[in-house]
Amino acid sequence: MMGRADLHTHSTISDGRDFPRDIVRMSSEAGLLGISLTDHDSLDGLEEFMLASAPDNLVRIPGLEISTKYGMKEAHLLGYFVPKNSNQLSAKLKWLRDARLARFSKMLGKLKDIGISIGKEDLDLLLEGVKSPGRPHIGRILIDRGVVGDMDEAFNRFLNRGRPIYVDKEKLDISDAISLLRAVGAVPVLAHPLTIDVPIIRDALFELKELGLMGVETVYDYSHFQIQDDPAEVIKASKEIGLIETGGTDYHGTGWRLPIGGISVSLDVVDELKVASRELGGDPDSWEVE
């Protein structure tokens, strides 16, 4: 694990199960030298993440993940080295979080329609400290009530598009999200690209590069998705197009697929992201602990 970084994790601020400080601790225990917190539509966990006690050689990358629309498809965009203070970014993230809350309320209504209701006290406990609730929170209700055995079953039976509890949500157009991140000095990187279900991934990446995309997640575990495409095609295309290649576990908590560090990339990738942030006029050291 020496010289490795996990650049995709989530905490209790969105749909993860561990506090931001625990993400840092577990990263150190796993022997990582780089870790990024990329909660959905929120920067609220980054201060705790950056201030948590950690070895001097553990590099922390402040990030986030934004749900966007690419044509008629949903696409997730990671932003690395997000600034500590940006009214422009904060305002747009609040709009996205409000959309998430509206969607969550509708999903709870659909949950009740199939005979599963959740009281206010249980809901308050479930969402304690959560800024961006999502489908995994509903999944945990289904698991706790014994309706499903695990999170994958929850998504496959109830939460994926076309299933009984699914509700679409408001999203930024991916071109607007890319422009927003670049404007604040954060590096836009396409997350798990093979989940977008486009005919030719190279063409999509080329178009997004023209829109300002700077990187793509090439190291990712797709084993729980029904995907026929070859991840090697993403790597080949990213090299041809000139995108930064990132990767990570998409960690959401113990028992959720892979542990922190279960997938990692070279620490050199962090340096590439830092350089890219500076090229955008960003300050990748704005969160540095003195």
Image (cartoon, rainbow, N blue to C red):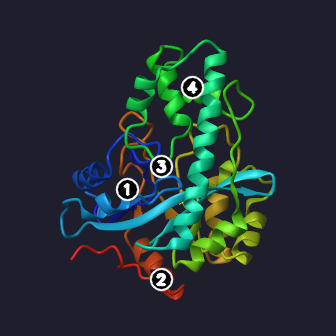
**Contact (CB < 8 A) between labels 2 and 1?**
no
The 10 Å Cα crowd at callout 2, few under 14, some 14 to 19, many 20 or more, is many
- Residue on which the image places disc 3: 250
* Mark in front: 2 vs 1: 1
**Relative to 237, residue 223 above or below:** above
Residue 156 in view: no
Q: CA distance from mark 3 to mark 2?
A: 25 Å
Helix, strand or loop status at disc 3: loop
The 10 Å Cα crowd at callout 1, few under 14, some 14 to 19, many 20 or more, is many
Residue occupying image coordinates x 49% and y 19%: 149
Numbered tag placed on residue 282 in the rendering: 2
Helix, strand or loop status at disc 4: helix
Numbered tag placed on residue 45 in the rendering: 1
Q: CA distance from mark 2 to mark 4?
A: 40 Å
Which numbered disc, 3 or 2, marks the residue that appears first in the sequence? 3
- Residue on which the image places disc 4: 154
